[in-house]
């Protein structure tokens, strides 16, 4: 017998352990703290390292449990739910291909390739099978293998693409999870057993299935699905573009980079972007709208898109001007505070709304206006260019709040054309390991902030939760009101951004509060072959806004 002292969620606890060399399992400790959490406990931070609940603690430690109300905790719960869904489909449809595609309306969109249409009866059978797997409470057991061993395991199973992907993994250890008779590799963490999934929903949507995890508000009910047909169509377009280029997984991208065939892929991406921007310009001219609003979450390439749209409008014999809402930020020391007492840069009230509306009204009336220019290095508003526009000359307004009715409340909707930019990468690790689109935006922002705003990766990661809260409050509620959506992601860009972001993430100290997020990003980036040749990327490309060399972004 031995006694260990633990600081758990800020409380000092003593635990007696029979085998000091083994210790006590985190899942057993978690039982004592379930009532303190409004979400399902699914993960723990032990001495600033994420640990699965199957981990044994055999020494004095500081522990913080994470539940489904936290991003990391929800990821683990959702990933475990995905595993159960895959297992159920493999049991019911022996030769099917199950693909965890992407997020959609707080859920996960998945497809089951059966060479026939999915039926309501199929959905019912899948749900019954998932419920049975959950009720059996099968342990989810993790085993670490060398790359050579893991490759052999998956080759013997006939999973050659998964085996091939593992060859690219930088670290030699590979996690393989076993649940009942099912084996798979997941780069993220899992819950201890299938019985830990208490709440979920499953239903047919378009050509596939939506999986909904437990709600943040009430863990005993699933999240509510709100249809987002415009966003779903953009995801479908992104998938079609990926298929056109033959790049839907990291494996295919890696081979293209190794064989130095990426130049054509880059040119195809640019041609697709150029073609669609031209189509948008044609629609704007046809509808004769004066105010063009461009909104997007952080790091979506708003400035580059707006400039390229200006060029296409000029081709259509229009002469638009472009105004960035970022230039209307109030001085940094006057920024409103969020509910945590920290500067809320994502709030619409971080913008000088009075000056913006005054300037916009003056411009529409044909007056000369001295625009502001925000200096991100100093956090101060400075004098920008002087503008005066002609009658009927279009005005492009771009910024995260572009679709917020508060921004242009004095202008009738009939005079506005609304565009929403998304960043929807369709390059997942493999069929069962998706890369969240939010992670691509975070990596873009880390690189851009370091290149042009003097920020370290640690600073950007620490500020990201505030950015995400602002998006949920100020941007995402309005995205389906857009007249058109445009996806600014490039299928090759994570391979390119890895070259910039990896050394920045590796600099973050183990004891920093940004360390866990940095380590998570590095986990999936290790599967990418780096693309360090920028020679094929034109100076007008959207990705240049983040890595440098842009000729259209100041």
Image (cartoon, rainbow, N blue to C red):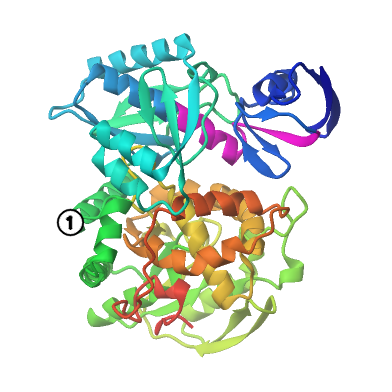
Residue 553: tell me if it is visible: yes
Residue that mark 1 sits on: 244
Query: Is 20 or 394 nearer to us in this picture?
Result: 20
502 sits left or right of 543 in the view: right
Residue pictured at 33% horizontal, 43% vertical: 430
Q: Quadrant of residue 219?
A: top right
299 sits left or right of 234 in the view: right
Q: From what the image shows, is residue 193 above or below residue 415?
A: above
Q: Dot 1, crowdedness within 10 Å: few (<14), some or many (≥20)?
A: few
Residue 405 placement (x, y as % from top left): 51, 55
Q: Point out the stretch of residues depicted in magenta.
A: 60-80
Q: Quadrant of residue 497?
A: bottom left
Residue 533 placement (x, y as % from top left): 35, 76
Q: From what the image shows, is residue 389 above or below residue 73?
A: below
Residue 72, magenta (yes or no): yes
Query: Is 391 or 101 nearer to us in this picture?
Result: 101
């Amino acid at each position: 017998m031995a006694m260990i002292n633990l600081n758990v969620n800020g409380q000092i606890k003593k635990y007696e352990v029979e085998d000091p060399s083994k210790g006590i399992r985190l899942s057993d400790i978690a039982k004592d703290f379930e009532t303190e959490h409004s979400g399902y406990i699914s993960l723990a931070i032990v001495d600033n390292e994420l640990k699965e609940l199957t981990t044994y603690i055999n020494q004095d430690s500081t522990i913080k449990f994470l539940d489904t109300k936290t991003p990391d905790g929800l990821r683990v719960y959702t990933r475990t739910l995905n595993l159960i869904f895959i297992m159920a489909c493999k049991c019911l449809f022996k030769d099917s291909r199950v693909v965890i595609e992407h997020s959609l309306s707080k859920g996960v969109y998945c497809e089951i390739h059966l060479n026939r249409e999915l039926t309501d009866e199929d959905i019912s059978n899948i749900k019954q099978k998932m419920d049975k797997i959950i009720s059996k409470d099968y342990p989810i057991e993790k085993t670490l293998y060398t790359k050579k061993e893991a490759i052999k395991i998956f080759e013997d199973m006939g999973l050659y693409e998964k085996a091939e992907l593992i060859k690219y993994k930088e670290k030699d250890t590979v996690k393989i999870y076993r649940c009942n008779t099912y084996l798979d590799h997941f780069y993220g963490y899992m819950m201890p057993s299938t019985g830990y999934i208490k709440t979920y929903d499953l239903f047919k949507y378009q050509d596939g299935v939506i999986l909904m995890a437990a709600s943040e508000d009430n863990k005993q009910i699933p999240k509510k699905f709100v249809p987002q047909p415009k966003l779903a169509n953009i995801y479908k377009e992104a998938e079609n573009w990926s298929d056109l280029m033959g790049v839907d997984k990291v494996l295919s991208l890696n081979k293209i980079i190794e064989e130095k065939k990426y130049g054509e892929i880059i040119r195809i991406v640019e041609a697709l972007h150029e073609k669609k921007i031209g189509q948008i310009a044609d629609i704007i001219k046809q509808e004769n709208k004066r105010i063009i609003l461009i909104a997007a979450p952080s790091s979506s390439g708003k400035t580059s898109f707006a400039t390229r749209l200006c060029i296409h409008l000029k081709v259509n014999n229009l002469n638009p001007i472009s105004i960035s809402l970022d230039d209307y930020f109030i001085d940094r020391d006057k920024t409103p505070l969020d509910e945590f007492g920290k500067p809320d840069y994502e709030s619409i009230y971080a913008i000088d709304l009075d000056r913006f509306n005054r300037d916009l009204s003056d411009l529409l009336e044909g007056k000369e206006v001295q625009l502001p220019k925000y200096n991100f290095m100093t956090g101060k508003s400075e004098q920008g260019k002087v503008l005066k526009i002609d009658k009927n000359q279009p005005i492009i307004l771009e910024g995260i709040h572009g679709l917020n009715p508060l921004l242009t409340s004095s202008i009738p909707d009939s005079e506005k054309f609304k565009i929403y930019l998304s960043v929807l990468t369709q390059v997942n690790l493999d069929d069962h390991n998706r890369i969240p689109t939010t992670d691509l935006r975070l990596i873009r922002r880390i690189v851009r902030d370091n290149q042009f705003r003097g920020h370290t990766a640690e600073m950007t990661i620490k500020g990201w939760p505030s950015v995400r809260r602002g998006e949920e409050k100020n941007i995402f509620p309005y995205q389906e009101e857009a007249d058109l959506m445009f996806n600014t992601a490039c299928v090759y860009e994570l391979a390119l951004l890895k070259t910039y972001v990896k050394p920045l993430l590796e600099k973050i100290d183990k004891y920093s509060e940004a360390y866990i997020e940095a380590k998570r990003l590095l986990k999936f980036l290790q599967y990418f072959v780096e693309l360090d040749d920028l020679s094929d990327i034109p100076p007008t490309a959207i990705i240049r806004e983040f890595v440098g060399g842009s000729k259209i972004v100041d």
